[in-house]
């Protein structure tokens, strides 16, 4: 992730925002297979992961079209200042999608990015704690994953961003426990605005679950941290 709107006065905070940089201790990447991942989740993971490196003639390897994005349980670990970033809140804060420890109980997901095609995909297996309508995934949980994939995509394209608008059409419910594919594509960039479209589909592509248009605005992280 890069940052394009920093000011010299808070450059250290900005560096902390620009993930995935290593934290002081080696962070755990949650976007790797665990025992809860079902066959569809594993199949799609292998599909994209195998395209992250390409075998060259003569035995070596080079970077492929896709890149796996790591995911941690915090975004800002050591930011300073502000009421909202007080020490107590800082020490307890967890990324919403990574705050349930039991593998498979909630959000199991992995993101891959393809910078050449300006695309990002998310593979998402929805656990039993995400129930909304009986036997199906809660619309807010689906929106969370859409925000995660499109927000990560927008940050890759433009540095730090905030979601200004998510316009989601829910077309068909997602069965609890199933794996779905989120496909995020850049629509356009206009100044600070980044407009991204995202489809949530069944893994065989036969069913569209949701269609989304998302608007992100590039922000100066200093403003966010100093707002408190
Ligand atoms: C690792 C996981 C990644 C996950 C990513 C998750 C990202 C998130 O969830 S962020 C949390 C949810 N979002 C928020 O809390 C955002 C709250 N809103 C805000 O902070 C501000 O309104 C913010 C930053 C979006 C925009 O404020 P600001 O920077 O002052 O922009 P502002 O001057 O109002 O508007 C700039 C332009 O955008 C347009 N705009 C702003 N908001 C909207 C909107 N909701 N809809 C349409 N247009 C908008 C304005 O009309 C203006 O357009 P123009 O330049 O053509 O006149």
Image: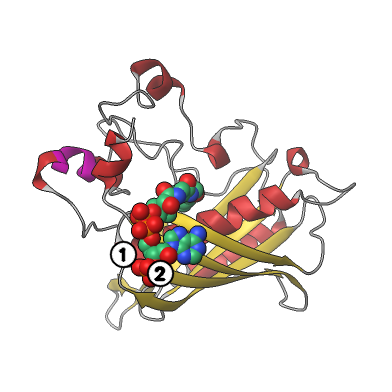
Image color mode: secondary structure
Indicate left or right for 6 with 53 as reference: left
Residue 202 visible, this angle:
no
Q: In the picture shown, does residue 122 fall above or below 88?
A: below
Dot 1 alpha-carbon crowd within 10 angstroms: few under 14, some 14 to 19, many 20 or more: many
Q: Secondary structure at mark 2?
A: strand
Looking at the picture, how far across and down is residue 13, in whole percent? 22, 38
Question: Disc 1 designates what residue?
Answer: 158
Looking at the picture, how far across and down is residue 175, in whole percent? 82, 56
Q: Quadrant of the N terminus?
A: bottom left
Which label sits on residue 228? none
Please provide the residue range marked out in magenta.
10-15
Q: Secondary structure at mark 1?
A: helix
Callout 1 touching callout 2 (CB < 8 Å): yes
The residue drawn where x is 36% and y is 74% is 115
Dominant secondary structure of the residues highlighted in magenta in the image: helix
Residue 48 or residue 213, whichever sits in front:
213
The residue drawn where x is 49% and y is 37% is 95
- Respond yes or no on whether mark 1 lies under 8 Å from ligand 1: no
The residue drawn where x is 31% and y is 64% is 158
Question: Disc 2 designates what residue?
Answer: 194
């Amino acid at each position: 992730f890069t940052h394009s709107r920093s000011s010299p006065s808070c450059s250290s905070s900005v560096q902390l925002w620009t993930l995935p940089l290593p934290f002081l201790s080696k962070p755990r990447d949650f976007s790797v297979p665990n025992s809860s991942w079902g066959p569809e989740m594993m199949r799609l993971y292998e599909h994209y992961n195998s395209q992250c490196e390409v075998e060259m003639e003569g035995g070596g390897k080079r970077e492929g079209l896709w890149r796996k994005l790591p995911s941690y349980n915090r975004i800002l670990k050591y930011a300073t200042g502000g009421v909202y970033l007080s020490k107590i809140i800082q020490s307890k804060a967890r990324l919403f999608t990574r705050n349930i420890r039991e593998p498979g109980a909630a959000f199991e997901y992995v993101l891959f990015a393809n910078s050449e095609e300006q695309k990002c995909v998310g593979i998402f297996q929805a656990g039993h704690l995400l129930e909304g309508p009986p036997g199906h995934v809660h619309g807010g949980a689906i929106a969370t994953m859409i925000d995660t994939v499109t927000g990560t995509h927008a940050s890759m394209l433009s540095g730090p961003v905030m979601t200004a608008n998510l316009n989601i059409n829910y077309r068909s419910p997602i069965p609890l426990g199933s794996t779905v594919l989120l496909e995020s594509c850049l629509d356009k960039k206009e100044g600070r605005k980044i407009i991204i479209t995202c489809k949530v589909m069944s893994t065989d592509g036969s069913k569209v679950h949701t269609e989304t248009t998302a608007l992100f605005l590039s922000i100066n992280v200093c403003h966010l941290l100093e707002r408190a």
